[in-house]
Image (cartoon, helix red, strand yellow):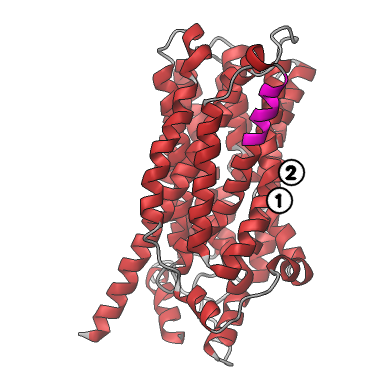
């Protein structure tokens, strides 16, 4: 009886952690994404002077969007430190509260016509708080899911946390889609505020769930054995700085959503003939595709040589992402939907897998900091700058070609850096990464180097991955 109870308990705990990570990240990303949608649709009109040249107000609104990305590394460092020092649970409760307060605050902000320059200043301030919160959220949520997973299934369970991004994005898009029925004057006056104020309700739900979370066994061992690092960021930068840079380089493909859902929304509604509701429907359909497809990225890299899987996932994006813009340009709804859905598939699969791959790269005692720093460094340089760069390219040239070319380059950078990462950490799920072997030695007292599994054919690899780790432990 005891031989089956323990695995069942592990599975139940893993599922609870995965579901909690999913719901929490959904709420956090909902808050973060409604800002991008509002920036594309309305912020340029209400938080800046109304006599600016065409496109400049939108560009400035995208700059305020970028402020959140500039703040995300601060959140990654701050909450990475706390998460590696005192545990993941407490930090995730704090980040959720911060995000909820900032988002609801934006919903109450007066406009430029009411308080002048203080309007954009307050907007940027609250956006920075959002950025700090989400900067600490992502790494902790991924680790709560992956560290509580059964052995050999960390990549699969990390996909729970990753699902929060498309789910939150879809929820944000649907909120504004419903409000597209509101007449434009009313939408500009008060309608856009409703999704921000609704965040307060979602945060209460998230807090109830997060307060019931448990720390992973690995983190409990670190805390119990007093193996925490006094200053995690110092060790990460001293010993793992190259890994952080490579990790950041893997992630530009995860940021192409800002080409699709932020820049393209503004471009389609301001420069092309789409109405707000029509193009939000295009985005919503693509997000449903992402929500369904994304977990299969984690499945794919868990079933075969990870290098081959990543190539199969990423290479199609070289063509599909640029093609999406020309599909949108036709102004035919069905063609735009097909173009955006096809472009969504590769980077969705990639996003479903990459969190688990990065989590394998760092040892437990500094994992939160290392993982967060990699992700937020990319967000700082690439994520927030994407709609700004795209809008600037379009304003400068008057056509979409430059934007299409740049979007393809994101996939190229991610492919190269992910292959470099796998060469350092290992490329089969049944093998312990170097960081996992370090944990095994430091926390469990093992001095043996677990043997690498014999490469298995595709017909048997589904069984070999988890079983091998269970045997070697």
Number of residues whose C-alpha sits closer than 10 Å to that of mark 1, classed few (under 14), some (14–19) or many (20 or more): many
Q: Which mark is residue 448?
A: none
Q: Which mark is residue 377?
A: 1
Q: From the viewer's perspective, is 431 left or right of 54?
A: left
Question: What main secondary structure does the magenta stretch of the protein show?
Answer: helix
Count of number-bearing discs: 2
The answer for how far apart the CA atoms under marks 1 and 2 are is 6 Å
Q: Is 241 in the magenta?
A: no
Q: Secondary structure at mark 1?
A: helix
Q: Tell me if residue 83 can be seen.
A: yes
At 72% from the left and 67% from the top, the residue drawn is 236
Q: From the viewer's perspective, is 388 left or right of 449?
A: right
Q: Position of residue 142 (x, y in %)?
A: 51, 58
Q: Is residue 1 above or below residue 315?
A: below
Q: Which residues are magenta?
A: 117-126
Query: What is the residue that sits farthest to the left in this orientation?
Result: 1
Q: Tell me if residue 281 can be seen.
A: no
Picture quarter with the C terminus: bottom left
- The image quarter containing residue 423 is bottom right
At 53% from the left and 67% from the top, the residue drawn is 87
Picture quarter with the N terminus: bottom left
Task: Provide the residue designation for mark 2.
Answer: 381
Q: Position of residue 200 (x, y in %)?
A: 43, 37
Q: Position of residue 178 (x, y in %)?
A: 39, 20
Q: Secondary structure at mark 2?
A: helix
Cβ atoms under marks 1 and 2 closer than 8 Å:
yes
Near-viewer residue (362 or 455)? 362
- The image quarter containing residue 244 is bottom right
At 67% from the left and 32% from the top, the residue drawn is 124
Near-viewer residue (421 or 75)? 75
Q: Position of residue 402 (x, y in %)?
A: 74, 27
Q: Is 125 in the magenta?
A: yes
């Amino acid at each position: 009886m005891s031989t089956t109870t323990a695995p069942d308990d592990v599975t139940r705990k893993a599922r609870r952690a995965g579901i909690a990570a999913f719901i929490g990240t959904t709420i956090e990303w909902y808050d973060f994404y409604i800002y991008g949608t509002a920036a594309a649709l309305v912020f340029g009109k209400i938080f800046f002077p109304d006599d600016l040249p065409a496109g400049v107000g939108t560009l400035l609104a995208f700059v305020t969007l970028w402020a959140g990305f500039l703040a995300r590394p601060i959140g990654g460092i701050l909450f990475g430190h706390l998460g590696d020092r005192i545990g993941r649970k407490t930090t995730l409760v704090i980040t959720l509260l911060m995000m909820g307060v900032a988002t609801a605050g934006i919903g109450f902000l007066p406009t430029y016509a009411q308080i002048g320059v203080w309007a954009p200043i307050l907007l940027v301030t609250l956006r920075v708080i959002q950025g700090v919160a989400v900067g600490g959220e992502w790494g902790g949520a991924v680790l709560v899911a992956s560290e509580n997973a059964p052995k050999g299934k960390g990549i699969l369970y990390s996909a729970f946390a990753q699902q929060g991004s498309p789910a939150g994005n879809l929820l944000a898009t649907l909120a504004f889609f419903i409000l597209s029925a509101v007449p434009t004057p009313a939408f500009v006056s008060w309608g856009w505020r409703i999704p921000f104020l609704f965040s307060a309700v979602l945060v209460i739900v998230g807090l109830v769930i997060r307060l019931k979370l448990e720390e992973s066994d690995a983190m409990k061992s670190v805390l119990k054995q007093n193996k925490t690092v006094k200053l995690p960021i110092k060790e990460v930068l001293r010993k793992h700085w190259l890994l952080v840079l490579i990790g950041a380089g893997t992630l530009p493909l995860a940021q192409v959503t800002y080409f699709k859902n932020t820049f393209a929304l503004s471009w389609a509604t301001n420069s092309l003939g789409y109405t707000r509701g029509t193009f939000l429907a295009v985005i919503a359909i693509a997000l449903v595709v992402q929500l369904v497809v994304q977990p299969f990225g984690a499945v794919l890299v868990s079933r075969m040589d990870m290098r081959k899987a990543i190539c199969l996932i990423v290479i199609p994006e070289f063509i599909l992402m640029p093609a999406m813009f020309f599909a949108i340009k036709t102004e035919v709804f069905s063609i735009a939907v097909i173009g955006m859905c096809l472009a969504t598939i590769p980077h969705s699969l990639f996003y479903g897998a990459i969190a688990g791959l990065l989590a394998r790269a760092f040892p437990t005692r500094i994992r939160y900091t290392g993982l967060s720093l990699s992700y937020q460094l990319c967000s700082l340089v690439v994520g927030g700058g994407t709609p700004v760069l795209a809008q600037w390219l379009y304003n400068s040239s008057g056509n979409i070609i430059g934007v299409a070319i740049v979007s393809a380059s994101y996939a190229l950078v991610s492919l190269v850096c992910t292959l470099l990462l796998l060469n350092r950490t290992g490329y089969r799920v049944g093998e312990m990464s170097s960081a996992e072997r370090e944990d095994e030695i430091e926390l469990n007292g093992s001095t043996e180097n677990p043997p690498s599994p014999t490469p298995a054919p595709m017909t048997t690899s589904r069984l070999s991955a988890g079983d091998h780790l269970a045997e070697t432990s």
